[in-house]
Amino acid sequence: MPSTPLSLSLSNHGQQLLLTGHDKTWELDALWLRERAPDESTLDPLTGQRLIEAAELPLDLSLTEARHNGDTLTLSFSDSHRSDYSLAALLTEAQPVGEHEGLSLWDASTWRQHGGELPEAEFSAALEDDDALGEMLDQLQRFGFVRVSGVPATENGMEALIHRIGPVRKTNWGGIADVKSVPNAYDLTMTQRGLEPHTDNPYRDPIPGYIWLHCLNNAASGGDNMLVDGYQAAERLRDVDPQAFECLTHVTPGFRYHDTTTRLESEGPLIELDSQGRVKRVRFSNRTERVPLLDSATLRRYYAARQAFYQLITSDELTLHLKLAPGQMLIMDNYRLMHGRSAFQLDGEVRHMRQGYVDRDSTASRRLLLKDRRRACEEATS
């Protein structure tokens, strides 16, 4: 990306600015430029928040002059405003985000090619060192999960690390809750049965962002975890069956959790896209899905598409199998990763996991702040 375009020109009576250089042209609208003018009369210098009411800008606003000197772009507008911009900052913001940029989609073969090495972190290092915590969060962002070792073998052993990132998301089950087999279980996770790949709590609004699963004890037989990259599965479906993919982005099933004290209901497509058509969230919860009574043709399309998606997320090709040992923990992106487990037998032993949720905003904020600090340190020492 050039820091200094070769040429500037105005088009459409000054309503667009064309920046041309290195065989590329950026078209920037005058209104878009005016509402993000970096001067103190437009943006508060302390908070960076906008001071003008952008919705009151005249819709026929245009540029009257554009010139640049190095990285500084000076623009004058028809409302008599004038401001200096950083060309590099503007073009960075104008650059389209690539498909799953910054993410590494994976399948079972990915880890075989890496010698079985998974995204890993060490609890005490992430707890005490910002660089280690930043690396852990970067891996979580890139792969959708990370396995953490050395977690204290106490019921709230993972809590100190959670507090380095944000608050525990409290639900009707409390904060950090037990996951173990109990009589008269209120949820199938509290039984010894296997669980199909799924995302957690699609019946909540908002859906919890990250799952923290800490192993205190595991069954000698069974109880293995299964992980599937839901983004990879969705993209495979888009490639092999575009009609099924489209169906799962448009038909919206409901999800429901009811017990004696709680009524939770929400809805959403199994594959959710952002404004650019990129996969941004997957849902799958056979235990709690409730498909509305749609017309028969739509229902049959949906059921066929759901089956095609299910066959992908349960395939050996896409599934990573692992077993947590006591003192290990999985952190999983609940908008991306599907997880399940094999059935287990206790035979007098105890399989005891502790699980909590942390929201996406606090996790993303912590990761980006640490990234900014690393960048600032690198620039200061360069």
Image: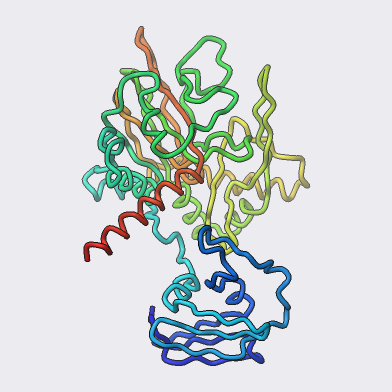
Q: Which residue is located at x 47 percent, y 24 percent? A: 176
Using the image as rendered, state which of residue 236 and residue 153 is in the foreground: 153
Using the image as rendered, state which of residue 189 and residue 10 is in the foreground: 10
Residue 168 pos. (x, y %):
49, 32
Quadrant, the C terminus: bottom left
Which of the colour schemes (rainbow, by chain, secondary structure, one colour) is used? rainbow
Q: Left or right: where does residue 220 sit relative to residue 251? A: left
Quadrant, the N terminus: bottom left
Q: Which residue is located at x 60 percent, y 64 percent? A: 50
Using the image as rendered, state which of residue 49 and residue 238 is in the foreground: 49
Q: Is residue 294 above or below residue 158?
A: below
Residue 343 pos. (x, y %):
42, 23
Residue 296 pos. (x, y %):
76, 46
Q: Is residue 295 above or below residue 39?
A: above
**Farthest top residue in view:** 348
Residue 245 pos. (x, y %):
58, 55
Marker count (numbered)? 0
Q: Left or right: where does residue 377 sit relative to residue 330? A: left
Q: Which residue is located at x 57 percent, y 62 percent? A: 277
Q: Which residue is located at x 50 percent, y 58 percent? A: 240
Quarter of the figure with residue 24: bottom left
Using the image as rendered, state which of residue 150 and residue 104 is in the foreground: 150
